[in-house]
Amino acid sequence: MPTFTMRIFRGDTARGEFRDYRVEAEEGMVVLDVIHRVQATQAPDLAVRWNCKAGKCGSCSAEVDGRPRLMCMTRMELFSEREPVTVAPIRAFPLIRDLVTDVSFNFEKAKTIPPLRLKPPEPDGTYRMMQEDIDRIQEFHKCIECFLCQDVCHVIRDHEENKRAFAGPRVFIKVASLEMHPLDTRDRTEFVRATASVGLCNITKCCTEVCPEGIHITDNAIIPLKERMADSFDPIVWLLRKFRGQTTQPA
Amino acid sequence: MNGHAVSQARPPIAAAHLRKDTWWALPLAVVGVLTSFIVYSTWAALQNAHYFVAPYLSPFYSPCLSKSCLHLTLGRGLPEFTVPIIGVVSPALLILWGPALFRLTCYYYRKAYYRSFWLAPVACAVRDVKAGYTGETRFPLILQNFHRYAWYVAVVFIVFLTWDAILAFRFPDGFGIGVGTLVMWLNVILLAGYTFSCHSCRHICGGHVDVFSKSPTRYTLWHVISRLNERHPMYAWLSLGSVGLTDLYIRLVSMGVIRDLRLL
Amino acid sequence: MANADYETHEHDVIVIGAGGAGLRAAIEAAAQGVSVGLVCKSLLGKAHTVMAEGGIAAALGNVWPEDNWQVHFRDTMRGGKMLNNWRMAQLHAQEAPERVLELERWGALFDRTKDGRILQRDFGGHRYARLAHVGDRTGLEMIRTLQYHGIHQGIDVYMECTIARLLKDGERVSGAVGYWRPHGKVVLFKAKAIVLATGGIGKAWKITSNSWEYTGDGHALALWAGADLIDMEFVQFHPTGMVWPPSVRGILVTEGVRGDGGMLKNNQGERFMFNYIPEFFKGETADNEEEADRWYDDKRNNRRTPDLLPRDEVARAINAEMKAGRGSPHGGVYLDIASRRTADYIRKRLPSMYHQFKELAGVDITKEPMEVGPTCHYVMGGVRVDADSTAATVPGLFAAGEVAGGMHGSNRLGGNSLSDLLVFGRRAGLHAALYAKDFGGALTVDAGQVDAVARELVEPLARVGGENPYAIQADLQETMQSLVGLIRTERELEEALRKLEALKARAKRVRVEGGRTYNPGWHTALDLRSLLAVAECCALAALERKESRGGHTRDDHPYTDDQWGKVNVVLRLKNGTLQLSREPLPEMPGELRALFQERK
Ligand SMILES: Cc1cc2nc3c(=O)[nH]c(=O)nc-3n(C[C@H](O)[C@H](O)[C@H](O)COP(=O)(O)OP(=O)(O)OC[C@H]3O[C@@H](n4cnc5c(N)ncnc54)[C@H](O)[C@@H]3O)c2cc1C
Ligand code: SF4
Ligand code: SF4
Ligand code: FES
Ligand code: FES
C-alpha cells in the first residue's frame, strides 16, 4: 500500500500552519478518504466538510496542490508518494477552522437574484416546454454549489474589495438559467450589469476550468449575459425590437 | 442567517499560490506566439510591397483599394493616400484595423492576453500581480462590449477574402490551381471558421432567443454555431497562423524566393 | 431566566431539516403567513435529497395515459406488502402529480416528452413509466428549485446547526435546543409547532448510500419527546450499490440504470433474476428473456422484466447469487447496460452514473458492466403520524419525509420518496402553521431542561481518558451490518442487542479532543446518542416481527404471515424505558380494497 505525506492546513484565523501526516492509501482512494483516515487515527478534530462522497452535494471543496477541487472526486493516484500533497481550505472565503470556510457570501448573493416570473399558462391550463428549449439551461442546473468557481475567480479571490459589487460565476449561471428560461418574463440585464457587476469578469475562464460538473460557465452563461447586456445599448437590436414590437419587463 | 461569522479573515496562508504544475508554460507560449505575430504583421503591413503575385493577394492587403494596387479587387481603385512626411501609407494599415479590432475584442483573445500580458490572473488560483482591479467596467475596456460591431466588419472581410480566393483560380493564362490557391482557400476557411464561431455571432444568430421551439431556424443556426463555438479557440490560433503564413507564402513567391507550384 | 444565557430565536413554526420535506414544509408554512425557521445540520441545499437520482413518482400519465392515482396507489401498497398506512398511500398517489407540476412552475426543468410535457421513466414496482426525472440528478433539481423558491418566502434559515433535543411544555412541544456546528455555541429555538424532516438512519450500517447526516436524529428526537415510532424493523437495502474500489463501497447506483435497460447478470453471464420471481408478482412479471426485452417497448402486451421487481426482492436475489458463489470478483454481481444501449444514450440518460464510475472506479459503463451489490439505503419506519395532518402523537410535533413512518409499509418503491417529501412536506407545513395559529396561551420553555441539554452537550469535551467516537461509530456500523443486515435471525438479533448495550456504555465514556469550533470528533460523539437509539429500535422491532416481509427478512421465519400483515410494531419511551407493542393497522375502506381484487 502506498504511503503519502499529506500536508494539511490546520488552524484558525489566528494561527494556522501546514502539518504533515503520513497516511496509507488503498487502491481507489480519494483525497477525502485519506483525510478521513487522518481524522479517525491521528487528528480527531480535523475539520472538514462533506456529505455525499460522490461528487453530488458540493460540500468537500478544497485546494489540493493549489488547485480548487472536490476532495471526494480527486483520486490519490494523481499524486506521487515522493512529494507531499498539500490540502488547503478554499482561500477566497473566511476561515472557520482547518479545511472549513464560511461560504455564506454565496448564499447572500444568491438571495439578490430576481426570481422567476412565470408566463400565463397555455389555453388548456398547462405549461409546455420542448426539450430543445431547456437543453441549454439544464446544463446550468447541474450546478452542485460547490463554490469552487467562486473561490477561484480572481475578481474576488485576489481583490476582497470587489466582494461587495461582484456576484460571481455561480450567480451568473443561475441568472443565465432564469434569463433563458422559456417560461420566464423578467428582464435581468440591469441586474446583471449593475447589481451583479458582470463587467468585472474578464472572461479568463478559471471558473470553467475548475467546475467539477463541467459546466461551460464562461462560454455558455457569462458571455451570453454580456451579449444580452450589449443588446441593451446596441442601436441595431433596438431598432429590430421596435420593428417587431417586442417588449420586456425590467426586473 | 447562520452562526458562521467566526471571523471575516481568510485562511492565513501567505503563498501567492500552491500549485506544483508548470502553470506558467501556457501564458509564456501565448506571449511568444502573439508577440511574433504582431511583430511580423506590423512589418509586413509596413512593407507596401510583395503582397501580390498573380493571381494571389495577401490577406493583409485585401481588399486592395488604392490606385497603385496591383490587384483587381475593385476595378479602378481609389486615389493614393499620402501623408506629409510619412509619404504613401501602406494600404494594409487602412485595412488591418478591422481584423485587428476584431481579434483585440474577441472574447477568446481577451482571455488569452488578460492572462498572459495583464497577468490577471496569469493562471488559475495564482494571485493577480496588480493590487487594483476593475475588470471591464471602465473606459477603455468597457468598449470590449462592442465586439459585435467588430464582428459585422469581420464578416465583410470574409466576403472580400472569399472573392480573392475565387480570383486565385484566375491565372493570366486562364483557369488554374496552384499551391497558393489552396493556401488562400485554407486561409479563408479557417478565418470563416473563426468568424462564424464567434460568441457575438452565436448570440446574434440565435442565442438571444428564449423559446427555441418557436424559432426553429434560429435554433438550428444557433445549434450549428454552438458546435463551432466550442472550437473557437482552435480556430483563433489556426486562423492567426494561416493569415500570417498566407502572407508569407505570397511574399516569398512574389520576391522570387520560392516558386509557386502549379497543380492544374 | 436562564434563557437569556443562550442565543434564542422564536418562531411560530420551526422546521428541522432542509431536505425536500423540510423545504417544502417551510415554504407552505410561510405561505400561511406564520413566521418560520428552518434548521439544518449541513449547508442549505446539501441534504440527502440532493443525492436522489432516479426520479419522482407521480401518475401524470404523460407517457402512459392508462396511468392514474389508483394504479399508483395499488403499486405502492403492493410494493410495501400491504403494510402501508393506506390513507397516506392514497393521499400520496392523489397529490403527487400536482406537487410535481408545482415544482415546474417554480422553475424546475424535467426532461421532456416529444409534445413538451414531463417525461417519465420506468422504475421497479411501478406498473407504468411514472418517474418524472432529470437525467439521473432529479434530487438536485428538486432541492435547488425548492431552495431558490424558498429564499424569497421570508424563511429564516439556520444552517450548520444541529438540534440535540426537543423541549416540552407539559404534553406539547415548545421548542428545541441545538448547537452551531461552526463555533459550537448552544442555541435555543422557541416554537409553537415543530416539523421534523430529518431524513433517515442509514449511517448505522457500514455499507450504506447515506452520508454522515443520517444518524436518525429526528427519530430519536421524537422518541425522546414521547412520540411513537413504527415499522423500525423495515430498512431498505438497495440492490445496487457500488462494491469496488473499497472506499466507494455502498455508493448508490440508481435504479434508473435498470429502468433504462440495464440487466443483472451473474459471473456465468446468466440473467439470474428470472429464477427469483416470487409468487406474489408472477402474474405481472415476464418469465423469459424475450418477453422481458419486448416489454421495454411494448408494455401493453408484455409483462415487465424481473430486473425491475421491487428492491427487497432484487436485493435478496443478488445476495443469494453471491452466497452461491456466482458473484463478481469484488463481491457483487454484474449490472450491464452497455450491451443493450448505445454509448450516447447512456451518457444522455445517466450522466452522473457514467461520471461516477469513470472517476471513482475507472469503469466505462458504456463499454463494460458495473459491479454492484446491496447497500443500506432507506428506512421505511419512523415517527407515527396522522395521515392527513402528519401530526405525531405529541401535540405540536409533526413529521414528514423519510423520518415519518407508515407511508411505504415494509418496502418503498423507487421514486416514491421524492413524491412523499413533496406531498407530506406540504401537509406538514400547512398543518403546523394551522396549529400554530390556533395555539392559545403563552409559549414557555423550561430553563432547567435547556441547561441540562447544554451541559450534556459539552460533557465529551471535558472528559479525560475515554473512548474515541470514531471507533464506537465504526463498531456500531460493523454490528448492524453483520447482525441486523439484509437477512436476519433471532440469534443474531439478540447478539446485536447485547452488543448495542455494550456500545451504549462505551458511548457514555466518549471523549473528544479539541475545542468547540467545527470539531467533527465532537459532532460524531454527539450523533452517537441518536444513532444508538435508532439502532436499538431497529434491532428490537426486527426481533419482534417473526416473519419475512419487504425490507425485513428473517432466515428463521422465511415466510410472510398474514397475521403479521395486520399489525405495526410500535416503539415508545415510557419513563425512560423503551416499550414495544403490536398495534393494528388502520382498516382500508372497501372501495380501495376493491382495487386489489380487479386483477387482470
Ligand atoms: C443516493 C440516493 C439516491 C436516492 N434516489 C432516490 C430517487 O431517485 N427517488 C426517490 O424518490 N428517492 C431517492 N432516494 C431517497 C430520498 O432521496 C430520501 O429518502 C429523501 O431525500 C429524504 O428526504 P428528507 O427531506 O426526508 O430528508 P433529507 O433530504 O435527508 O434532509 C434531512 C435534513 O435534516 C437535517 N437534519 C438531520 N438531523 C438534524 C438535526 N439533528 N438537526 C438539524 N437538522 C438535522 C439535515 O441537515 C438535512 O437538511 C435516494 C437516496 C439516496 C441516498
Ligand atoms: S471567467 Fe470571469 S467569473 Fe469566471 S473566473 Fe474568470 S473572471 Fe471570474
Ligand atoms: S458552477 Fe460548477 S464550480 Fe461553480 S458552484 Fe456550480 S458546480 Fe461548483
Ligand atoms: S462530499 Fe459531496 S461533493 Fe464531495
Ligand atoms: S471573435 Fe472571438 S468571440 Fe468573437
Image (cartoon, coloured by chain):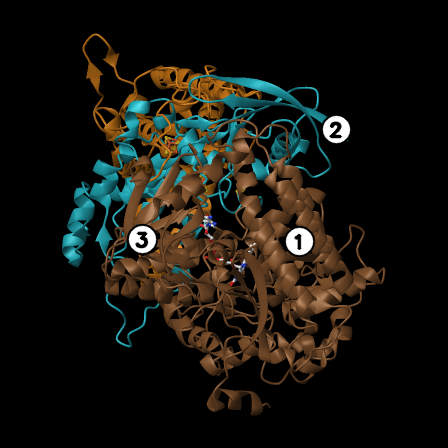
- Count residues near mark 2 (Cα–Cα under 10 Å), then give few for <14, some for 14-19, many for 20+: few
Residue under pointer 2: A2
Identify the residue at image location x=46%, y=21%.
B126
| Same chain assignment for discs 1 and 3 | yes
Place residue C362 in its image quadrant: top right
Q: Tell me, yes or no, whether dots 1 and 2 are on the same chain.
A: no
The N terminus of chain C: image quadrant: top left
Residue C560 image-quadrant placement? bottom right
Of all chains, the one bearing label 2 is A
Image height of C64 relative to C331, above or below: below
Q: Residue furthest right?
A: C325
Going by the numbered disc 2, the residue's amino acid type is: Pro
Q: Which chain is orange?
A: B
Would residue B25 appear left or right of C149 to someone viewing this image? right
Estimate the x, y position of residue A238 in percent, counting from the top left: 17, 47
Question: In this structure image, what is the colour of chain A?
Answer: cyan
The amino acid beneath tag 3 is Ala
- Foreground: C261 or B101? C261
Taking the image as shown, residue A158 lies to the left or right of residue C506, namely left
Identify which residue, C485 or A54, lies in the foreground. Answer: C485
Q: Which residue is mark 3?
A: C191
